[in-house]
Image (tube, helix red, strand yellow):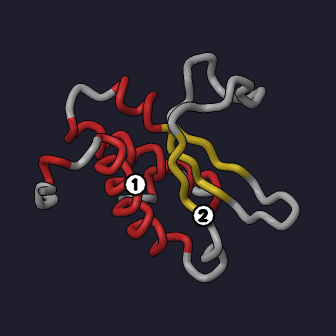
């Protein structure tokens, strides 16, 4: 007999995905129709070959520009975010900051104009 699903049974990965989905839905208000095709993704860890402009520390997110048939993509890296967060509430704060930074970079506006 299987247990009924309850919030306490959700994995950290599922909970993290839910946070990114929630924040990405709020980010859509800033992206508008021009960037309606922007994809949001979660990856466990960043690739081992960071972009030349990225810090030496593991990045917590990345804006992947348009390439070929693939549109813009905002990626949030779960493990680096969880490592930097002290608790679940701080995970949400960091995800909001990461997505806000990437949306601001895409729109070429100060991050202070993006309130997620």
Density class for disc 2 (Cα within 10 Å; few <14, some 14-19, many ≥20) is some
Q: Looking at the image, which is closer to me, 40 or 94? A: 40
* Number of numbered discs overlaid on the protein picture: 2
Q: Residue 26 placed where, x, y %?
A: 39, 68
Which numbered marker is on residue 8? Answer: none
x and y, in percent, of residue 44 in the image: 51, 36
Q: Is residue 6 above or below residue 69?
A: above
* Residue at image point 30% right, 39% down: 91
Q: Quadrant of residue 25?
A: bottom left
Tell me which label, 1 or 2, sits earlier in the chain: 1
Left or right: where 116 falls relative to 73: left
Quarter in which the C terminus is drawn: bottom left
Q: On the image, numbered disc 1 is attached to which residue?
A: 20
Per the model, the C-alpha gap separating discs 1 and 2 is 12 Å
Tell me the element at label 2.
strand
Q: Are marks 1 and 2 in contact (CB under 8 Å)?
A: no
**Label 1 crowd (10 A; few <14 / some 14-19 / many >=20):** many
| 107 sits left or right of 97 in the view | right
Question: Residue 85 at what x, y percent from top left?
Answer: 30, 29
Tell me where residue 28 appears, x and y as whole percent: 48, 72
Residue at position x 49%, y 70% from top?
A: 30
Please give the name of the residue rendered at 36% of the width and 43% of the height, measured from the top-left corner: 13
Examine the image and state in which quarter residue 29 appears.
bottom left
Apparent side of residue 94 relative to residue 87 in the rendered image (left or right) = right
User: Which residue sits furthest front?
Assistant: 1
Answer above or below: position of 58 versus 77.
above
- Residue at the spot of label 2: 39
State which quarter of the image contains the N terminus: bottom left
Q: Dot 1: what SS?
A: helix
């Amino acid at each position: 007999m299987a247990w009924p699903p309850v919030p306490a049974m959700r994995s950290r990965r599922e909970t993290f995905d839910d946070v990114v989905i929630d924040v990405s839905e709020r980010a859509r208000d800033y992206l508008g129709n021009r960037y309606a095709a922007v994809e949001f993704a979660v990856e466990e860890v960043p690739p081992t070959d960071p972009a030349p402009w990225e810090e030496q520390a593991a990045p917590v997110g990345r804006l992947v520009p348009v390439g070929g048939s693939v549109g813009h993509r905002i990626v949030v890296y779960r493990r680096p975010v969880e490592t930097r967060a002290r608790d679940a509430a701080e995970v949400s704060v960091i995800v909001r900051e990461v997505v806000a930074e990437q949306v601001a970079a895409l729109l070429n506006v100060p991050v202070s104009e993006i309130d997620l």
